[in-house]
Image: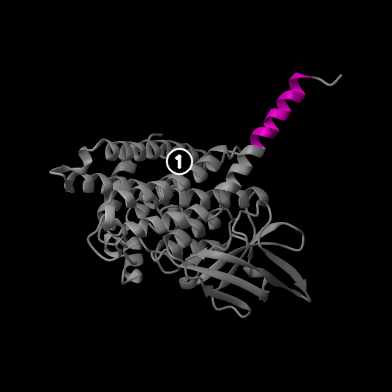
Amino acid sequence: MDFTEFHEELRSTAREVLAGNAGAPPGGGGAAGPPQDTQAEWRQFADLGWTGIEVPEALGGAGATFAEAAVLLQEMGRSVTSSPYLGTATHGVGTLNLLAAHPDRDVLLHDVATGRRRLAVPLTDVDGDPPEDVAPFRLQESGPGLRLHGRSMFVPDAPDADGLLIVAIDPDGRPVTVHLDADSAGLAVTPQPVLDLTRRFGAVVADGVEVGSESVLRFAGDPAKAVRLLWDRAALSIACDSLGLSEAMLTATVSYACSRAQFGRPIGSFQAVKHACANMLVKISVARSLLSCAVRQLVAVDDDRAAVLMAKSYVCTTAVEIAGSALQLHGGIGYTWDSGVHTYLKRAALNRSLFGSPVYYHKRLAERYVYRARRRVETEVPPE
């Protein structure tokens, strides 16, 4: 089905709502920084139904897919919004939807949809690259119960989360999800300062946390595939954010170039400025196409991850380039704190490293095509 009209309506509404919640207006108009009251913003998101957009209707949500969440994520990147939406409504709900039916899972989904609970999902290891089929936490048998060990760095929205959904390897070597309250004994959540002031990250360390059997939730299908799907969701969520901020930087730069005069004419009339803006537009067009393909692939649960790998690598890399070009084209004012341009550049730079660096994704793409080339040679040229 074609949901283009619905997506455009959702995009228009989100842009209007988020315009008043922006961390820093593009191209100036106020000091950079997160909103003063993120609690009020979260309640607003819940009232609009955004927190439960992927939650089943029977549990108080909209019953939509990641394609609709991607629209919101893109607009949040455009306005550099500071909210726990990424950790809770994207990563948290995405994890819960992959779990087998369970009363506790349903309660968590309902609480997220109504805005009563905020979650965080530790996925990254110490190096920050995807651990593929291996989670950064381990469940070990200890007497009659289980204990959780491991650590995860730069977990989105962890410092403000009420609970954590920790993907761990159980004693049988299978990935499972452990639901823990943020104040559980032996569990440490430490804020991690970053240059991007519009978001909050935390380091999650589990040092022998006692885990009851009721806290261990299992995936509905293949656990290894579920972990890969979680990583793909995380990667595309960041790519959506990067595309949104890239579009905001192009809009702000074109507006500034049309209003800023030099030598008696707008600087936008100069060929060098025109070419720079045109290059930004071309990169955004390619990024939008790659991301659209990757989102469709994710929603269809396609085993071929090529589109996801390309989208995360290209979109996040070009976002840094576009924000850098915007900074230069704004001239001296672009380097000032009040311009707001630097906020986008910092966010784009952090996005490029989150959930896998471009080098990691380039390596995975190279391995994929080398493997396919070898298979083709083996098939077409039989050994002598």
Task: Give the prevailing secondary structure in the magenta stretch.
Answer: helix
Q: x, y (%) of residue 43? A: 34, 66
Quadrant location of the C terminus in the rendered image = top right
User: Which sits in the foreground, 338 or 214?
Assistant: 338
Q: Which residue is mark 1?
A: 291
**Rendering coords of residue 162 (x, y %):** 49, 72
Task: Tell me the magenta residue range.
Answer: 368-381
Q: Is residue 186 left or right of residue 191?
A: right
- Vertical arrangement, residue 54 with respect to residue 273, above or below: below
Q: Residue at x 55, y 74 (%)?
A: 189
Furthest residue toward left = 264
Image location (x, y in percent) of residue 119: 49, 66
Front residue of 266/185: it is 266
In the drawing, does residue 326 fall left or right of residue 237? Answer: left
Q: Tell me where residue 339 sits by quadrant.
A: bottom left
Q: Can residue 80 be seen from the camera position used here?
A: no
> Residue lying farthest front?
263
Judge whether residue 312 can be spotted in this image: yes
Label 1 crowd bin: few (<14), some (14–19), many (20+), radius 10 Å: many
